[in-house]
Amino acid sequence: MYRPTMTTHPFEEHIPRLRRYASALLRDRTRADDLVQDTLERGLKKFSLYRRGTDLRAWLFTIMHNIHVNDVRSATHSRTIPLDDEPVYEAVETDGTSALLDLTNALERLDPAQREVVLLVGLEQLSYEETARVLNIPIGTVMSRLSRARERLSALISGESVSYLRRVK
């Protein structure tokens, strides 16, 4: 009996990581799934531009980042978000969920550029160099944003205030 062999596309192994990053970035499963679908669609259309031998995962994350930035830009032009409108999640005390909710709330309060770096380096375990390529920024900017984000996360979780103003003599 003949059975056709199922071949997998090279994108398939990266879908779980794309979904995880999109979910953490957007905090909305439906929007995250849409972002992943848009990323995969654009990746398939532009696959001829992918350079064989380079990191496919980083290439897909770059596509996702660019789509996300375009979505944010178009949303910014179409609506206004109040500055004090910060999402807060209710803490339901179970084993360790309070700390996780504290971290989730703190991540939500980070500047979006810092949150992207934290998620790519911390959650997706991209190197600084890969993160710089994905976000199209210098590696020093990655390190700076990550350092500031870690400081801010620590302060937010511990309840301290953080001042980013430097004293000028």
Image: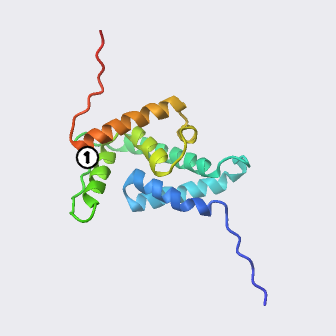
Q: Which residue is mark 1?
A: 86
Q: Is residue 44 above or below residue 150?
A: below
Q: Amino acid at mark 1?
A: Glu
Query: Residue 9: percent from the left, percent from the top?
Result: 67, 64
Q: Is residue 150 above or below residue 33?
A: above
- As rendered, which of 162 and 49 lies closer to the eye? 162
Image side of residue 106 versus residue 73, left or right: left
Q: Going by the picture, which residue comes out furthest to the top?
A: 169
Q: Going by the picture, which residue comes out furthest to the bottom?
A: 1
- As rendered, which of 35 and 4 lies closer to the eye? 4
Q: Residue at x 58, y 59 (%)?
A: 14
Query: Residue 65: percent from the left, percent from the top?
Result: 51, 45
Question: Can residue 104 be seen?
Answer: yes
| Quarter-of-image position of residue 15 | bottom right
- As rendered, which of 54 and 9 lies closer to the eye? 54
| Quarter-of-image position of residue 110 | top left
Q: Secondary structure at mark 1?
A: loop
Q: Is residue 13 above or below residue 84?
A: below
Count every numbered label the image shows and give the total. Answer: 1
Query: Residue 108: percent from the left, percent from the top?
Result: 32, 47
Q: Residue at x 62, y 54 (%)?
A: 43
Image side of residue 85 versus residue 27, left or right: left
Q: Residue at x 41, y 50 (%)?
A: 25
- As rendered, which of 64 and 55 lies closer to the eye? 55
Query: Residue 36: percent from the left, percent from the top?
Result: 51, 58
What quarter of the picture does the N terminus occupy? bottom right
What quarter of the picture does the C terminus occupy? top left
